Amino acid sequence: MISALITGHEMIASVLISQIISNVPAAIMLSSFTSNSAGLLMGTNIGGLGTLVASLASLISFKIYTKSEGAQTGSYMLVFTAINLYFLVILLISFSIFRLI
């Protein structure tokens, strides 16, 4: 069933799933259901942008930041998410224009 859902949409599916479970676990999980490794690779790489959960490195840096004196976690989350979503959209539009999706 999963294969049928993502076939032909590997990139966008991996971007979306990366927002929920992080990009590395998304790549590992979806690799069992597709032979389109290029779409999966592009999607999970781009999928590292977006939410804080999208990349384990982002979660680690956030945890380090929260321990710093004067940390403003709400502001950090707002700015981080806005910048990451901006670049995620830019990359998705770029791939769309160049027909790489």
Image (cartoon, rainbow, N blue to C red):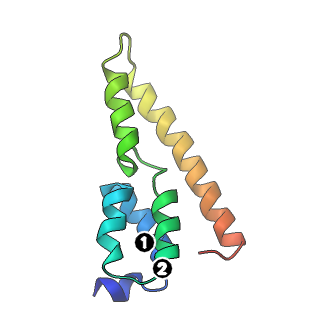
Question: Which residue occupies 67% across, 77% down?
Answer: 99
The spot of residue 17 in percent (x, y) is 36, 64
Eyeballing the image, is 64 above or below 83? above
Horizontally, residue 12 falls left or right of residue 33, namely right
Q: Residues within 10 Å of mark 1 (few under 14, many from 20)?
A: many
Q: Quadrant of residue 34?
A: bottom left
Taking 96 as reference, is 76 left or right? left
Question: Could you tell me how many numbered marks the image carries?
Answer: 2
The one nearer the camera, 37 or 67, is: 37
Left or right of 42? Residue 33 is left
Relative to 4, say whether 87 is above or below.
above
Q: Is residue 95 above or below residue 67?
A: below
| Residue occupied by mark 2 | 9
Q: Tag 2's secondary structure?
A: loop
Residue at which label 1 appears: 13
What residue appears at the point 46 percent right and 34 percent down from the top-left corner? 78
Local crowd size for mark 2, using a 10 Å CA cut-off: few (<14), some (14–19), many (≥20): some
Q: Are marks 2 and 1 in contact (CB under 8 Å)?
A: yes
Quarter of the image where one finds residue 66: top left
The amino acid on which the numbered mark 2 sits, given as a three-letter code, is His
Mark 1 lies on a secondary structure that is: helix
Q: CA distance from mark 2 to mark 1?
A: 6 Å
Q: Which mark is residue 3?
A: none
Residue 83 image point, x, y percent: 56, 40
- The single residue placed furthest to the top in the displayed view is 69
Q: Residue at x 27, y 88 (%)?
A: 1
Kind of residue indicated by mark 1: Ala
- Is 11 on the left-hand or right-hand side of 20? right
